[in-house]
Image (spheres, helix red, strand yellow):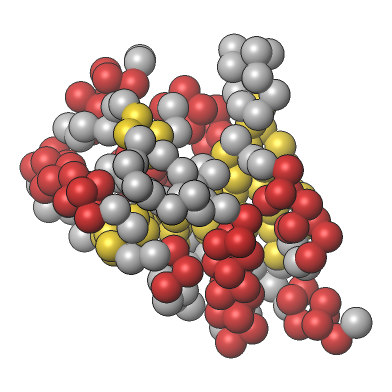
Amino acid sequence: MNDKDYDRLLRIKTVGTREWQNQSSHYNRYEATPYLALDELFDDYELERTDGVVDFGCGKGRLAFYLHNRFQVSVTGIEMSVQLYQEALENQASYREKTRGSNDTVRFECCLAEDYKVESTDNRFYFFNPFSIQIFRKVIDTILRSVEKQKRAVDIVLYYPTADYIQFLENRTPFELLKEVKVPGLYDRNDNERFLVFRLGEGEYEQAQST
């Protein structure tokens, strides 16, 4: 299925890109992860129903509805744009008709990523290159402080990963690379068309802090 067909199946509208005028250089344009890429990742990287996913820069909510439909997991979408947030809510209402109200574990917050209060149930964090490395560092720091308070294993999932993101995670945090998933048909033309999953095991942050 192409992206439009997949949207039609989920009863949502997420196709297209959007540039923002007069926007800070710290935030990138809206563009949803291709469904083709999501299928490839989640054929290799499965989620449990007990997982709590946070999508930073969720846009119109494609990832949230995809994951809820496939794994029935809880998903929180974080979006700074009021316009995109409203479109995500419209998609949620339409998706609710498809699922007959069974998507109560999908929610959206309109706020800056660095202002989101990480919940103790959040353990999977998704980034499609939504903002600058400066903001990414703040978000990762917030995640680590949450892990320090509530010990748990957490994953960072990067799509189209930038060198800055990778170097920061590898050199400045306790996260370790768990797996790489390349998107067939796209990676051959652009080696950024891949996912990197970094994991911090339960108790590893405390161990890293003590060394």
From the top left corner, tell me how far across and down residue 5 is, in percent: 26, 18
Query: For the point 42% across and 27% down, which residue is it?
Result: 35
**What is the total number of numbered labels drawn onto the structure image?**
0
Q: Quadrant of residue 74?
A: bottom left
Query: Is residue 66 in view?
Result: no
Residue at the far right: name it.
211
* Front residue of this view, candidates 63 and 116: 116
Q: Quadrant of the C terminus?
A: bottom right
Q: Is residue 114 above or below residue 76?
A: below
Q: Residue at x 38, y 49 (%)?
A: 23
Inspect this view and state whether residue 206 appears. yes
Front residue of 24 and 92: 24
- The residue located at (54%, 44%) in the rendering is 129
Residue 39 is left or right of residue 153, and the answer is left
Q: Quadrant of residue 30?
A: top left
Residue 158 location (% of width, % of height): 60, 45
Q: Where, quadrant-wise, is the N terminus in this rendering?
A: top left
Residue 50 is situated, as x and y percent measured from the top left of the image, at 44, 62
- 88 displayed left or right of 145: left
Name the residue at 52% across, 37% down. 42
Find residue 36 and report its horizontal and vertical position in percent: 47, 23
Q: Nearer the viewer, residue 164 or 145?
A: 164
